[in-house]
Image (cartoon, helix red, strand yellow):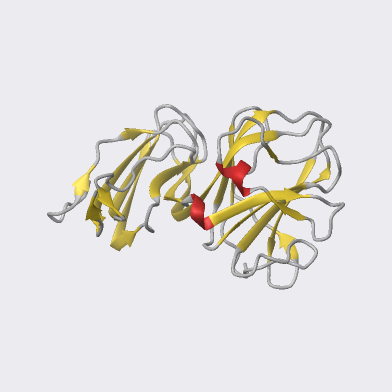
Amino acid sequence: MAHNPGNFNTTSPISYPSQCGPTTALSPPSNLSGSQLGVGEVILVNRSGVAADVGFGWKQPNALWEAGQIDVSATPDFIDDTTDAQDAGTDDFALFTTTNDDGFLVRSTHKFNVIGMTVGTAEAGTPTYVYEYYNGTAMATLPTYSTPAAFTAADHIISFPAPHDWATGSTAAVSTDSAGKYVIQVTASTAPTTAPLANVLWVTTLFDYFPLLADDAALNFEMSTEVVVPAAASIVPYFGTAATGNTIQVHWRPLGGTPS
């Protein structure tokens, strides 16, 4: 760490073999109810063997986000299935069906940059997927950092920069109850022949992002001012290429809270 202004704690390097969830690297102290994390510095080390994108952010508490299916035969076509998205039931959240233009939608009261999912049943066929956000008028093409090459039976992430014109809500054809929420939808313009099913989803908001950090290199995110993570949220790193040697180290302190 470059500095330690007295009342901050420093973790040791924490091995993080995933890309960005479902596990977290640092959570608020369990003995302080309602506390938040203040972050002064984060060091990420890329040991993936290739240059890889890196970053860090906070995993959104379940209370902030919702998810469900897009059913092209319905009007509006969003069907809430948040319970199945957030619990760990095997194959209980349908990402797609075998019908063209079906898919899923995630929405949150906060902007986000990563949608993660643990897929239990893998896709088959040669599907084509469409990623969209709401720009205040229509659903528009979402710029992405990365998308799954295929929804195999594994953990996957969809990552993207927040569009400059991302507006809350959606078109009436998508949803009539998304006011005040930021929406991302993913549909299959060409459907899979076997639909992938997920066990659980998660949502992450990135604080910082850096493209193509060299292999065996470290990146120091040293904040000019302390970054405060929302209540009940945990720190999670972002690695474009998963590897068992990747690590995160955090310079942090608890903020607020009462002994529990």
Quarter of the image where one finds residue 155: top right
Asked whether, in this view, residue 92 is left or right of residue 124, the answer is left
Look at the picture and state if 133 lies above or below 245.
below
Whether residue 150 is visible here, answered yes or no, is no
For the point 64% across and 69% down, the residue is 179
Q: Nearer the viewer, residue 225 or 28?
A: 28
The extreme front residue here reads 260
Q: Residue 82 location, x and y as percent?
A: 62, 48
Asked whether, in this view, residue 250 is left or right of residue 176, the answer is left
For the point 65% across and 35% down, the residue is 198
Q: Residue 206 location, x and y as percent?
A: 47, 54
Q: Residue 130 location, x and y as percent?
A: 75, 50
Asked whether, in this view, residue 103 is left or right of residue 2, the answer is right
The extreme left residue here reads 6
Q: Nearer the viewer, residue 211 or 22?
A: 22
Quarter of the image where one finds residue 175: bottom right
For the point 80% across and 39% down, the residue is 97
Q: Nearer the viewer, residue 22 or 55?
A: 22
Asked whether, in this view, residue 167 is left or right of residue 193, the answer is left
Q: Residue 83 location, x and y as percent?
A: 60, 45
Whether residue 121 is visible here, answered yes or no, is yes
Q: Nearer the viewer, residue 55 or 6?
A: 6
